[in-house]
Amino acid sequence: MGWSLSHLPPREPTLVDAALMAAGKALYISNAFESKCRYVLRIAELESYIESHPEATLPDAIASLSKEKLLGPTIATLKLFPVVTSDEVSLLEKARDARNFIAHEGAAFGYVFSVREKHIREHLSKLRVAVSQLAQGDDVVSRWVYEIEEKVIAPRGSDSDYLVMVDTWVFNEVDCT
């Protein structure tokens, strides 16, 4: 079949819609994670530049910022900052890989008109693992953003609370029975 859509009705219309909704929500979290990583990097670079160039003007400092837009190099640069722990780097790298899976394969479970329930559920299982890894990295970078913006240490609740919240939101349309 050459076309992505067909005049044939889907075999599993409800499950296909739920899987596509989950993939879309996962992509939203992925995009937010990527954006927050870039934001944190720019703030860290700005602070570093100002510390090492106290005579610099604000336009000079802004001009010094990285123009990097790709997530891999952004995380590679973030991990060079001494305040970023090896555990955080590991979570960010796993989240980057999960983001790539979600962005490139999140909705790639087959043709909507012919895919079978078993294949969709297998794909959703892989997506759920990726969402969990993404949520762990997103939790790390979200705490940093909170601390940058609020100028206080991020509240320490259970890290698993955020992971459960993300999983529930992404997969709430999927009947797991």
Image: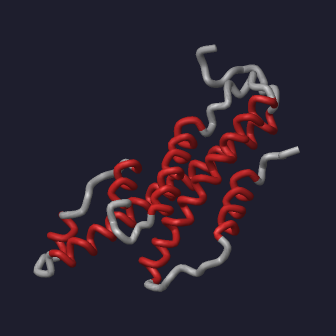
Instruction: Specify the quadrant of the image occupied by residue 121.
Output: top right
Apparent side of residue 6 relative to residue 89 in the rendered image (left or right)? right
Q: Which of the image's four quarters has the C terminus?
A: top right
- Residue 135 image offset from top left, x and y in percent: 60, 58
Q: Looking at the image, which residue sits at the far bottom?
A: 152
40 up-or-down from 109: above or below: below
- Residue 58 image offset from top left, x and y in percent: 19, 75
Apparent side of residue 125 relative to residue 104 in the rendered image (left or right)? right
- Residue 50 image offset from top left, x and y in percent: 21, 76
Q: Nearer the viewer, residue 132 or 177?
A: 132
Q: What residue appears at the point 70 percent right and 69 percent down from the top-left corner?
A: 161
Q: Which of the image's four quarters has the N terminus?
A: top right
118 up-or-down from 85: above or below: above
Q: Looking at the image, which residue sits at the far left?
A: 55
Asked which colour scheme the image uses, the reply is secondary structure
18 up-or-down from 53: above or below: above
- Residue 48 image offset from top left, x and y in percent: 25, 72
Q: Nearer the viewer, residue 107 or 164?
A: 164
Q: What residue appears at the point 32 percent right and 70 percent down from the top-left corner?
A: 44
20 up-or-down from 49: above or below: above
Q: Looking at the image, which residue sits at the far right?
A: 177
Q: What residue appears at the point 75 percent right and 25 percent down from the top-left corner?
A: 115
Q: What residue appears at the point 67 percent right and 59 percent down from the top-left corner?
A: 166
